[in-house]
Amino acid sequence: MHSYSARRSRTKAWAFLSIATLCTALACSNLLDVKAPDAINTSSLEVPASAQLLVFSSIGDFDCAYTSYIVASGLMSDELMETTLTASRWSYDRRDIDPNEAAYSTNDCTTLGTYTPISTARFTSDHVLGLLSGWTDAQVPNRQFLIAQAASYAGYSRILLGEGFCSAAIAGGPALTSAQIFALAVGKFDTAVTAATAAPDDSTLNLALVGRARAELDNGDNANAIADASRVPQGFVYYATYNNGSAQRTNRVYSENNANQSVSVSFEYDSLNDSRVSVTDQHALASDRHTELWTQNKYPSGSASIPIASYIEAQLIVAEATGGPTAITILNNLRTTVSLPPLPPSGDPAVIKADIASERARWLFLQGTHLYDVRRLQLPLVPAADGSYSRVYHKGGNYGSETCMPLPAVETNNNPNARNPPSP
């Protein structure tokens, strides 16, 4: 198996990252807007000699946002269940997020925020990409590789905004539909593919190809999704890396589920007897002292890496975009790699759709894809809307029907351009 992760220079990167992560969804039109007393001036870092540091720092922003998003979207899509007594966290699990809530909109990635952390990652990758575009190959060693990296993460940040939010605004612009955001993501991946080819760097090229295929599939562009995903070689995996030495760098899936017992694996996943969804019954109660604690085994520590892109996901994209009996063949080829029996052959579109959804849920368990699968494939909401929240004991309110997070009020209050509903 070919595994890749972004190369890190963590000690140096934190100087820039500590400033970059102060940006909220709207406050930073430029990193220099942030005035942090006793902090270094960012202008001293925005020079060609710091190009690698700047790119790695923006990747750090994404990694933290990504792991927080995986937990939040896992709660909304019933991969996970909320098991705390903290009411401000319940709306993810209850699927009734109010635009005025701070938890999902302005909290940082260490406290399960989503909109601001993802927007920060989007901003820093865009900002660094702009700087790199103004420098030359003579000024910056490996400039094409760094452009490919920055553009790839700019694309993935847009994917998370498009998949997780009903609409989102970028850089103080208008509210955009998911389809519009996916189109912007494709543009970033176009830049990444070109730069990675020029570098050349196969791992970043494949990262960008999977990302572009995912955005194309999300937007219904099946032909291009097949073309891009089919180029990804067998065994490819690209990881976001973590380290439990700090809250910012911890794998939040592990910390929220296994360490803090703030979430539990949902009932639908705790008895599948499937190696792709390995879970453990802890025979104990979670932090609310009511819910049985089931823990995931996919990420065995707070330092465990999380896949961002892989050959497996690429093949799942090809299967869905192709459809028909060919899709079942692709799914069965993947199943043989983990010694699972083949799915029955079928030409029934409904059966094939259900098989694809089930295989995606298992292969990509706790990788941040299931929420948008529920939305775009119109999968049944589990638990059903209007039932009392929660399934274990009544916490208050009823389950809602949200399959995406609303555009936060902090965006519309501070960005006049985002106050009108997005144009189709």
Image: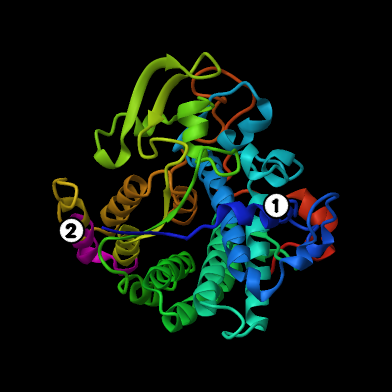
> In the figure, residue 231 lies in which quadrant?
bottom left
Mark drawn on residue 83: none
Q: Residue flagged by tag 2: what amino acid is it?
A: Asn
Q: Nearer the viewer, residue 60 or 38?
A: 38
Going by the numbered disc 1, the residue's amino acid type is Thr
Measuring 33% from the left and 63% from the top, which residue is drawn there? 320
Q: Secondary structure at mark 1?
A: loop
Label 2, secondary structure: give it.
Answer: helix
Q: Earlier in the sequence, mark 2 or mark 1?
A: 1
Q: Is residue 296 visible?
A: yes
Which secondary structure dominates the residues rendered in magenta? helix
* Residue assigned mark 1: 21
Residue 327 located within the stretch drawn in magenta: yes
Q: Quadrant of residue 312?
A: bottom left
Give the left or right position of residue 392, taking residue 222 as reference: right
Q: Is residue 383 visible?
A: no
Q: Position of residue 22 (x, y in %)?
A: 75, 51
405 or 325: nearer the viewer: 405
**Residue drawn at 42 percent across, 31 percent down:** 265
Q: Residue 189: x, y in percent?
A: 50, 73
Which quadrant holds the N terminus? bottom left
Q: Position of residue 266 (x, y in %)?
A: 42, 31
User: In the rendered image of this protein, does residue 102 appear above or below residue 319?
Assistant: above
Drawn side of residue 22 relative to residue 361, left or right: right
Left or right: 405 as drawn, with respect to 253: right
Q: Give the quadrant of residue 103.
A: top right
Image spot of residue 356 (x, y percent): 31, 54
**Residue carrying label 2:** 333
Q: Is residue 120 above or below residue 247?
A: below
Image vertical order of residue 117 relative to residue 157, above or below: above
Number of residue marks: 2
Region rendered in magenta = 321-332
